[in-house]
């Protein structure tokens, strides 16, 4: 089995979010236990496994995602990484449709500038009271908290960008809270600190990785924690932006494309646009490693 490591939502190696990608031959899935062990061995936030489907199936590929601990319902960066791998292999010349077990049909569109756009279901949030223990787990009091429906995250709005960047979470407490509340993870977010950044973000080219003193403009900032599923802090979370996009579009009164900056140690940028009950996520990817599984 060939394995690729692809850094997603970046055009620079060693930035963005690394994903394992395994393009399988046609036929039945390998045993689930084997897929879990491969994902645990790679130890990235997610590893994507994709297999081609026969003609007439309605989609070209079926895709599944595994964290080091569990199979997950939706993953943006590993889907972007898989579409990138298909393009590198010469297997993607136009849009590709992926069947998924839990999130329906997901489409990846190659853009003329080399970026890729994912078409995912939107996950608008419903405001709820601040869960017990969340303020202590984050070390900062939220402005608002919203549950994101089938996505299964808690969208947590903090006072400002500095608060998001400054969060030093108690991961054990977050794991306990997410298990108790039956959540996948916790998103923390705030508007971009600079008004000029927000005003100019829509004029930016396709998103690239941010970092250092030359960070591009962006509209909002976020981080994501899912320790109960084996992801202490995810570097760049495409799926979380299916909730962030409708939230910030409504808050900022935006109908054009926005840019989200994920303020992890690796950093990354995700272009987002809301289209009814769908969200388009745009980014780039780069392959950093290719290997062959020998066992």
Image (cartoon, rainbow, N blue to C red):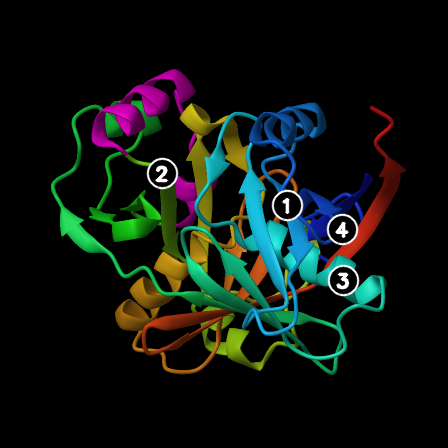
With respect to residue 189, does 31 lie above or below? Answer: above
* Crowding near the residue tagged with mark 2, few <14, some 14–19, many ≥20 C-alpha atoms within 10 Å: many
Of labels 2 and 1, the one closer to you: 1
Residue range (magenta): 161-182
Q: Say whether disc 2 or disc 3 marks the residue closer to the N-terminus.
A: 3
Towards the viewer: 126 or 23 = 23
In the rendered image, which quarter is residue 122 located in? bottom left
Which mark, residue 40? Answer: none
Residue 265 shown in magenta: no
As helix, strand or loop, the secondary structure at mark 2 comes to strand
In the displayed orientation, state which residue is furthest to the top.
172
Q: Main secondary structure of the magenta part?
A: helix
As helix, strand or loop, the secondary structure at mark 4 comes to loop
Residue at point 72%, 54% (across, down): 26
As helix, strand or loop, the secondary structure at mark 3 comes to helix
In the rendered image, which quarter is residue 265 located in? top right
The residue labelled by disc 3 is: 86
As helix, strand or loop, the secondary structure at mark 1 comes to loop
Residue at point 35%, 58% (across, down): 243
Residue at point 64%, 62% (across, down): 53
Which mark, residue 28? Answer: 1
With respect to residue 265, does 190 lie above or below? Answer: below
Towards the viewer: 244 or 32 = 32
The residue labelled by disc 2 is: 186
Give the CA separation, mark 2 to mark 4: 35 Å
């Amino acid at each position: 089995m060939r394995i690729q490591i692809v850094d997603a939502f970046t055009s620079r190696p060693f930035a963005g979010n690394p994903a394992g990608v395994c393009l399988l031959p046609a036929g039945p899935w390998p045993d689930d236990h084997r897929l879990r062990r491969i994902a645990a061995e790679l130890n990235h936030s997610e590893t994507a496994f994709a297999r081609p489907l026969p003609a007439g199936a309605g989609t070209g590929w079926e895709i599944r995602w595994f964290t080091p601990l569990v199979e997950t319902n939706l993953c943006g960066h590993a889907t972007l990484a898989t579409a990138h791998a298909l393009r590198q292999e010469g297997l993607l010349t136009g849009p590709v449709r992926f069947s998924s077990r839990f999130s329906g049909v997901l489409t990846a569109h190659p853009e003329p500038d080399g970026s890729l756009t994912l078409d995912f279901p939107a996950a608008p949030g419903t405001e709820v009271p601040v869960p017990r223990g969340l303020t202590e787990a984050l070390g900062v009091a939220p402005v608002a908290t919203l549950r994101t429906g089938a996505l299964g995250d808690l969208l947590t709005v903090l006072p400002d960008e500095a608060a998001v960047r400054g969060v030093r979470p108690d991961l054990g407490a977050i794991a306990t809270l997410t298990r108790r509340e039956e959540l996948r993870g916790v998103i923390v977010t705030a508007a971009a600190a600079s008004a000029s950044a927000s005003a100019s973000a829509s004029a930016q080219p396709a998103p690239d990785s941010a970092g250092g003193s030359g960070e591009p403009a962006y509209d909002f900032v976020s981080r994501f924690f899912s320790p109960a599923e084996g992801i202490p802090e995810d570097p760049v979370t495409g799926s979380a932006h299916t909730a962030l996009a409708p939230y910030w579009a409504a808050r900022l009164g935006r109908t054009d494309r926005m840019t989200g900056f994920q303020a992890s140690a690796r950093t990354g940028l995700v272009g987002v646009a809301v289209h009814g009950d769908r969200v388009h996520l745009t980014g780039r990817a780069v392959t950093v490693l290719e290997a062959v599984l020998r066992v």
